[in-house]
Image (cartoon, rainbow, N blue to C red):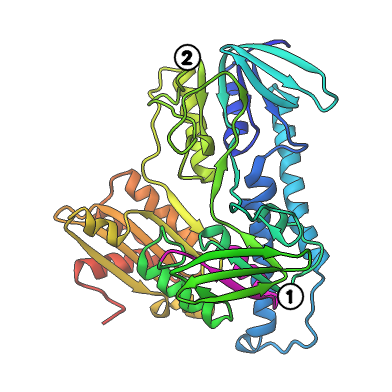
Amino acid sequence: MSAFDVVVIGAGTGGYVAAIRAAQLGLTTAVVERDTVLGGTCLNWGCIPTKALLKNAELYHTLTHRAEEFGLKIEGVSFDWSKVIGRSRGVSDKLNKGIEFLFSKKKVDYIKGTASIPAAGKVEVTAADGKTTTYDTANILIATGAKSRDMPGFPYNGTTVIGSKEALTLEKQPKSVIVIGAGAIGIEFAYFFNAYGTKVTVVEMMPDILPVEDTEVSKTLEKSLTKAGIRILTNTKVTGTSEDGKGVKITVEGAANETLEADIALVAIGVKPVLPGGIEIKLTDRGWLQTDDRYQTSVKGIYGAGDIIGPPWLAHVASYEAVQCVEGIFTKHKPKKVGVFPGCTYCHPQVASIGLTERAAKEKGLKFKVGKFPYVASGKALAAAEPEGFVKILYGEPHGEIIGAHIIGSESTEMIAEIGLAMNLEATWDEIEATIHAHPTLSEMVKEATEVARGHPIHVP
């Protein structure tokens, strides 16, 4: 076909979801993707393969450092680095092939090539062989996402200076790594490399690692990772960088004033937009697509969703925005912008949060109570040998609505969904406390933390 109801540019988590939803609504739909595989950064170079690597790391660490705790005697445990990396690539390969299958079943046209927008209603696609084809469409959805932002004067070279994408396919395990940036990506890779014995140093200019998280959570995680052997330098600024093809030197100032040396520098300082060429579209002051309440850009008929319209840069947010955008265009549904959303970091212990942090609530002058329950007081956590962490819930007063929740500990990234649902339904501490949670489970700590907030805890003093 050469004409469509909607053409989606980008087949990442936002783009492919938008295309499938449009097709479900009976619209002629096409997706343009310049990469050789579908699924975008999340599926191929982010969320999914990193979780495979982190599961490997957690298992290896358990067998080598905690086997005796479980009454196991294991000798001579080793690992095959190429197979560790290979398993994560295999998981991604299986899933991106699944998207192509879904496109076929849903009757979504998959167009391979690089897209540009010469004018409203036109999408020009340049194939790998240089051939150019123009498609007509009443609606264009830009879902081109973002990519790792490199440091000025210290560009990625794929060997000694790398981003998260290169970190996923390293042929050999590095003996030492300096991670610049202690957000979720930096911390996850720091944990991964450390678990296999790589010497890891993390440099972060902010006072805490995971700066967007609750301060108490960040401090707790820092202690845990430091105990595991990771050197963490917060309040520390990078002032000099160099590499010689064999390794890197990073000069830092702040909490430490020295020159660090390592085989590799992993730069994880954020992301920058990936914009299609062509027609001029209004951007925000930071370079992201500017959209209105219906996800429409400054050009009528051209929309944006996902990472390309700015933070939060999360796959589940991109999917939500994509569906809202498509339904807003083609149905009577009034699209919603993202409000409350969960954020997760998959190191060990895991970190998950939703809503306001305690410091943010105080800055807003809100009146609230905090309910905090430790993992060490949970029967299930102790049975699983996971006593590290806590559940912390912020309840507004006087009505007891949830204004934020922060969990650090085993399976916290699974537990946060219950709180997200409760917030979406505007549940209060009355409903949480009245909900019978199975025993023994980790999720019952949500109820226990609620009892703490209300002043009548059962299992803590």
- Between 430 and 9, the residue placed more toward the observer is 9
**Rendered residue at 75%/27% (across/down):** 113
Tell me which segment is drawn in magenta. 188-206
Pointer 2 residue: 300
Element type where label 1 sits in the image: loop
Which amino acid does the dot numbered 1 rest on?
Lys
Q: Is residue 31 above or below residue 14?
A: above
The quarter of the picture where the C terminus appears is bottom left
Which is more foreground, mark 2 or mark 1? 1
Element type where label 2 sits in the image: loop
**Rendered residue at 64%/51% (across/down):** 46
Pointer 1 residue: 175
Whether 205 is among the magenta residues is yes
Tell me if mark 2 has few (under 14), some (14-19) or many (20+) residues whose alpha carbon lies within 10 angstroms of its own. Answer: few
Query: Residue 385's spot in the image, x, y percent?
Result: 53, 80
400 relative position to 258: left or right: left
